[in-house]
Image (cartoon, helix red, strand yellow):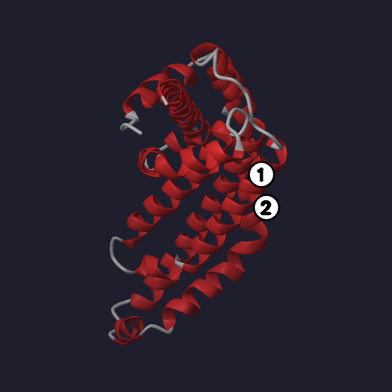
Amino acid sequence: MSYLSTADSFSKGIITQLQPRMLFAIVLPLVIAMVSILFLLIFAWNPLDEWFFSSAADWGWFQKAQSFGWGFSTMSDWLAGLLSFISLSAIGVIIGLAAAAIMVTPLAVKFISERYFPNLEKKGQHVNSVSTFNAIKVSCIFIVGWLLTLPLWFIPFMSIILSLFWGAYAFSHMSQVDAIVEHATAEERKYILSTHKKGFWFIGFVCAALSLIPFMGLVMPVFSIIVCTHYGLKALERYRQQKNTLEMHG
């Protein structure tokens, strides 16, 4: 299959995001994310803060840094609390993203498919169960992976690297299945996700990078779904066209 550019998906994604119904769709994951963050901060901040600091305290270089004094202990306590806050906020956002994947994606797919891919036949089966399973799987992998790599944030620049990696994973993997699940068969879905894996990862990486800009993270859950939908449906349309061409000449 020929290379499929993500630039067109981003440009059409911006146009789609500015539609009134898509702007309104931003509210749902935002509200769910805010409620989740508040709940997590109330019940999970202190346990996570203690686990975070105790895990880092086992590292040799961390113990040496503490032995030098210079207020490092106070600073590390403050840093552990700050990173716990950031981490719980990120988990709240992934919950909001999962909600968007389940509830907002059907709206985005309907709008995009009707406007841009009116002739693309829907062949998907077990759409709701596939979508829900994917949302749960991606959320669990994100939360476990995020928490396990949390102590690495004490290493310089690792906070940025890990934020981009896990953000890219969440935005790409949460959206790529839902983008095509209504239209693609199981075989087509497997092929598209495998062949265009790098494209979906790139979309996720760009959305993760944009999320580092203040307030942009509020838009990214829905925007990533929109861009992935444009990209996924275009990939499916091209795949079927090429398959039909080969069959006609075969």
In the image, is residue 213 above or below residue 235?
Answer: below
Asked whether 116 or 224 is in front, the reply is 116
- Where disc 2 sits, the SS reads helix
Measured as percent of width and height from the top left, residue 189 is found at 54, 38
The location of residue 136, given as percent across then percent down, is 64, 50
Q: Amino acid at mark 2?
A: Phe
Position above or below: 51 against 21: below
**Callout 2: few (<14), some (14-19), or many (20+) C-alpha neighbours within 10 Å?**
some
Q: Is residue 43 left or right of residue 159?
A: right
**In which quadrant of the rendered image does the N terminus lie?**
top left
Q: Quadrant of the C terminus?
A: top left
**Which residue was labeled with disc 1?**
35
> Element under label 1?
helix
**Residue 215 visible in rendering:** no
- Compared with 17, 216 (above or below) is below
Residue wearing tag 2: 39
Q: In which image quadrant can residue 13 be found?
A: top left
Callout 2 touching callout 1 (CB < 8 Å): yes
Residue 154 lies in quadrant = bottom left
